[in-house]
Image (cartoon, grey):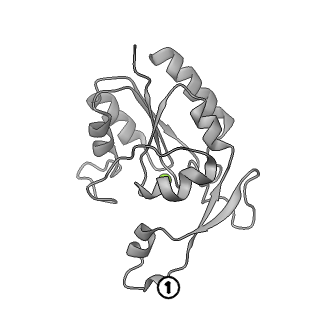
Amino acid sequence: MTQQPLLLLDVDGPLNPYAAPNTRRPEGYGTHRLLPESWVARNAPTPRGRVKPLRVWLNPAHGAELLALPYELAWATTWMDEANTFIGPRIGLPELPYIPWTEVFREDPDGLHWKTRELVAWAAGRPFVWLDDELGPQDIEWIEANHPAPALPLWVDPRAGLRELHFAALREWAEDAC
Ligand SMILES: [Mg+2]
């Protein structure tokens, strides 16, 4: 049996369209105020009780829509394992594997996104789609040159989040690539 391709999911941007205008929550989304430990740590030395929770917009339909795709899902987000606690259950996703970054936001010597090298290493030669609002042309080029299997780095507008065009692209790519 052939393995399904991986779908590597960023949270902020694709699932949480954080850059949409503050006063106009995108349709279909609910508002959550979350206080993951990684956010508390990023706000150090502010004590936990005084850290302002993150406003996260999530669409409860996304879990089922993602699970219906012919992919194996995994988190590729600064939320790491906290995505399983804070994000997955709110959109109907089961516990998923996650990429355990050695250092988030690390500056890359060649100007790649800080996720790119570790993400490709983690994929270990398997076909993948990567959904992220921060990847750029240099990442697409580098992945093309350094990943031995088909890969589709797919940019998502953080003002709009995942849309039907992404789901359509995902279905089409899985058919062509595998
Ligand atoms: Mg993001």
Q: Position of residue 2 (x, y in %)?
A: 40, 15
Q: Residues within 10 Å of mark 1 (few under 14, many from 20)?
A: few
Q: Is residue 74 positioned above or below 84 on the image?
A: above
Most foreground residue, 115 or 135: 115
Q: Residue at x 34, y 29 (%)?
A: 144
Say whether residue 157 is visible.
Answer: yes
Q: How far across and how far down the image is residue 10, in percent?
A: 48, 48
**What residue is drawn where x is 62% and y is 32%?**
167
Q: Position of residue 46 (x, y in %)?
A: 42, 85
Q: Left of 144 or right of it: where is 96?
A: right
Q: Horizontally, is 62 left or right of 147 in the view? A: right
Q: Quadrant of the C terminus?
A: top left
Secondary element under disc 1, as helix, strand or loop, is helix
Where is residue 176 shown, x and y percent of the image? 50, 15
Residue marked by disc 1: 49
Q: Is residue 133 above or below residue 178?
A: below
| 59 displayed left or right of 82 | right
Quarter of the image where the N terminus is located: top left
Name the residue rendered at 23%, 52% in the picture. Answer: 109
Amino acid type at circle 1 is: Gly
Say whether residue 79 is visible.
no
Q: Residue at x 30, y 39 (%)?
A: 122
Q: Ligand 1: does it lie within 8 Å of the C-beta at label 1?
A: no
